[in-house]
Image: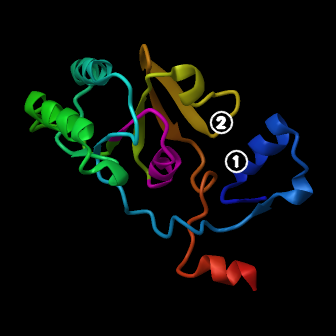
Amino acid sequence: MIVHGSQTKKVLIKFCNWNKKKIIISRSFRFINSKFFSSGIYLPYNFKNKNFIISKILELQKIKNLNLENIFIHPHKKNDKKHVKIKNELQSLLRNDKAIKNHIIFINNSSGIFYALECGLVVIHISENPISDILNPKIWKNIKINKICDNVYIYKLKIKNSLIKFGKKNEFVKFLK
């Protein structure tokens, strides 16, 4: 098994009983640099309850002064009516000139959470299903995890480069040699 961070290897060994000799840490084949994300809200590939998401974001806006102007639809759902509708609704509700710029909001599951943490951003995670989605502090010891309100958590990375070792161009080809 190839993983791209020491913390992932530790989790697989401790909680999944994988053989540490069969887990290799390599630079990421997918994540090449650390400058991909902008602050804002990242809508998931799929969601069930639009009203729940909107209510949580509005609740969050009251608690924290965040940059909520940028709303990004999942790349595979850019033309999906459900996604466009929630983006438009959120844009009409959220206007903020004095916003904190280093926060990013993910809704439901996303591989972007670890990537954003490694990029130095503070991640806010809103989940329709927190039992399966929210990171567990007993497992992810290198991430500071705090509950903001029901179904909303904030993450900060304690140890840089522990989740993802950023790759270089053609990293996969080099790995095969």
In the image, taking residue 165 as reference, residue 147 lies left or right, namely left
| 82 versus 120 height, above or below | above
Q: CA distance from mark 2 to mark 1?
A: 7 Å
For image coordinates 22% across by 29% down, the residue present is: 65
Residue 115 screen position, x and y as percent: 49, 52
Q: Is residue 134 visible?
A: no
For image coordinates 57% across by 53% down, the residue present is: 160
Amino acid tagged 1: Gln
Residue 52 painted magenta: no
Say the numbered circle drawn on residue 148: none
Between 62 and 105, the residue placed more toward the observer is 105
Q: Quadrant of residue 136?
A: top right
Residue to which mark 2 is pinned? 140
User: Circle 2 — which element?
Assistant: loop
Q: Quadrant of the C terminus?
A: bottom right
Q: Is residue 148 visible?
A: yes
For image coordinates 16% across by 41% down, the residue present is: 69
User: Circle 1 — which element?
Assistant: helix
Q: Which residues are magenta?
A: 104-119
Q: Quadrant of the N terminus?
A: bottom right
Between 4 and 75, the residue placed more toward the observer is 75
**Precedes in sequence: disc 2 or disc 1:** 1
In the image, taking residue 128 as reference, residue 138 lies left or right, namely right
Amino acid tagged 2: Trp
Residue to which mark 1 is pinned? 7
Residue at the bottom extreme? 177
Q: Are marks 2 and 1 in contact (CB under 8 Å)?
A: yes
Residue 173 screen position, x and y as percent: 65, 82
